[in-house]
Image: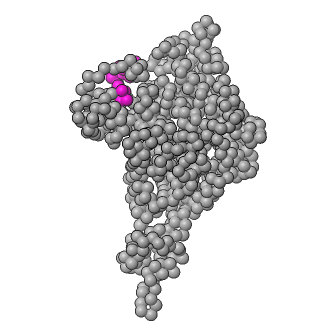
Amino acid sequence: MRISILFENNEYNVSATGKETILELIQKSDAEIIAPCGGMRKCGKCLVRVENTMQEMSREEERLLGARNLESGYRLACFLHPEDGMTVEIPLQSARNKILTGSNLEMDSFWPAVGIKKIKTEIPHLDRQVSDLGNILENSGMKIDKNNLPLLKKLTEAISSSMNTPTLISYYDTIKGIEYKDNGSFYGIAVDIGTTTVAVYLYNLENGQFTGVVSELNDQKQYGADVISRINYASTEANGLETLNRVIIRQLNELTGKLCSEHGIKKEDIYMAALVGNTTMMHLLMGLDPVNIGKLPFIPVSTEMHDFPAAELGLEINKFGHALCLPSVSAYIGADIIAGLLACRLHERDEISLLVDIGTNGEMVLGSVDRMISCSTAAGPAFEGANIRFGTGGVSGAIDSVGISGGELVFTTIDNVEPVGICGSGIVDAVAVLLDNDIIDETGRFYDEDEIDGGNILGGRIFSFEGLKSFRLTEHICITQKDIREIQNAKAALAAGISTLIKKYHIKTSDVAKIYLAGGFGNYINVDSAMRIGLLPDLPRDKVIASGNTAGAGASMCLLSQKYIDLAEILKRRVEYVELTTDPGFTNEYIDNMIF
């Protein structure tokens, strides 16, 4: 049988056996859909509209959809199975996402590892016979891999076609390619592959000038919102690893093409890509099996720095282009954290500082010029809107702040449009408001009606939703008791990680001079609310610095200077890793931090 999938004005005709779910068929096509739970029928986010179906809706699907989505005619792709002639429409859910790409990039070195150099070779004659290879080496002052047979085969053609003025492409002063025509442009890209988002930055490598950036939600999102979901997909589905690798490579090529179109250059003008991501994302990028990252004792295939011909990764840049994959520390302290350390310069600071990247995992590094220790906590995707009943990412219409003004509940939404859900920063604010106004207690429990003061301005917003005590934000959006528990577990994991590192460093919380918040959630979060719910240590407000996309900044630094590539290698060796699952004190810290 065949079904039609409509997505972004494109129609995909897909063959089906009838045993797959609609979600699985979408995942195998070129269409995209948001599915944070990876098809486990838990999140209620894989919304579709269907025509020509006789399938009845189960009570569980109805519950997950909620009244508003039911009124809009949505179904859930993970519950539906194909029927011959069925048409499935995927609503546009991701085009307007607010993705953080900015950072505080500070550079004190411009020395790209990749270079292009036009040289003048001698014209051969009988009195001085020198090989083409010898001619290039003598006149370039560079080295060459004498065992690079494909390159050797091109030397004579390049010299003769360029009339003895070939252009050499080098990496760390080793010749990697040779061209016989002038290329007017010399660019590179820095790439941050997050679990949730992908950002590609374009730089002019002749002068270090930032040119532009593009970003999107990670197309792997339809295979799960977190790394564990994607590891499971890679290891349990037929060709799962190949699918996830193909999806991210295709997306990087599309984003690179978009950048080139916007700035009037060609992909052939890009000679280097510096790439970072967490350890799982780096494995999926390189096509390495991540299965052991997801189970004890959490051993990756590699945490080393790797540099490849870009074509070997499938990146569509110059045919002699180079791809640099920054190193990781462990299975859950990835290249994005190494890049973040470069950007925040913890390794240079005399005072002890803390770098925190809050995502589906909470990665953190505490240290100074003397010592750096790190850990990762399984916070889960609650702060990114997943596992929250009306949670969403940072999309247009997401409630991103909540407060009290003039005795009334107030909120803002991204782009100041009608609310469609609530994102991480809004959820943290909302929990802080509920605590401050005696709607929930320090254990996270909603107060009963007879426990709430009659003059409480928010008391009338408590109601029962799907059998759970809940707090109404708008007519269609609420925070449930289960949502509170999700946030409670996530914040406890993060706070426990921070307190464990502080104790292992043998310092007091007040000894931490600065907290650098990395990533989108850290940049947009209300620090006072984060401290109120116990997500961050209670320190003077001016000690907390929203640092933007430090992963993208660190990748850019490595693109622009060999100094930072070499330093990334050093940091990998210097950062100590604390495995919290075997740490005897972490469980107690976690329990203590469950209290708001």
Residue drawn at (45%, 33%) of the image: 36
Q: Nearer the viewer, residue 260 or 485?
A: 485
Quadrant in which the N terminus appears: top left
From the top left corner, tell me how far across and down residue 331 is, in percent: 57, 45
Residue drawn at (50%, 20%) of the image: 478
Residue drawn at (43%, 77%) of the image: 165
Residue 172 against residue 299 in the figure, above or below: below
Residue 67 against residue 266 in the figure, above or below: above
Q: Is residue 451 left or right of residue 252?
A: right
Q: Is residue 382 visible?
A: yes
Q: Which residues are magenta?
A: 66-79
Residue 482 against residue 301 in the figure, above or below: above
From the top left corner, tell me how far across and down residue 234 is, in percent: 44, 42
Q: Nearer the viewer, residue 438 or 226?
A: 226
Is 75 covered by the magenta stretch? yes
Q: Is residue 74 left or right of residue 288?
A: left
Is 232 covered by the magenta stretch? no
Q: Nearer the viewer, residue 96 or 227?
A: 227
Residue drawn at (59%, 23%) of the image: 431
From the top left corner, tell me how far across and down residue 264 is, in percent: 39, 56
Q: How is the image coloured?
A: one colour
Residue 397 against residue 111 in the figure, above or below: above
Q: Is residue 362 left or right of residue 542?
A: left
Q: Quadrant of residue 459?
A: top right
Quadrant in which the C terminus appears: top right
From the top left corner, tell me how far across and down residue 3 is, in percent: 25, 34
Q: How many marks?
A: 0
- The extreme front residue here reads 296
Q: Is residue 210 visible?
A: no
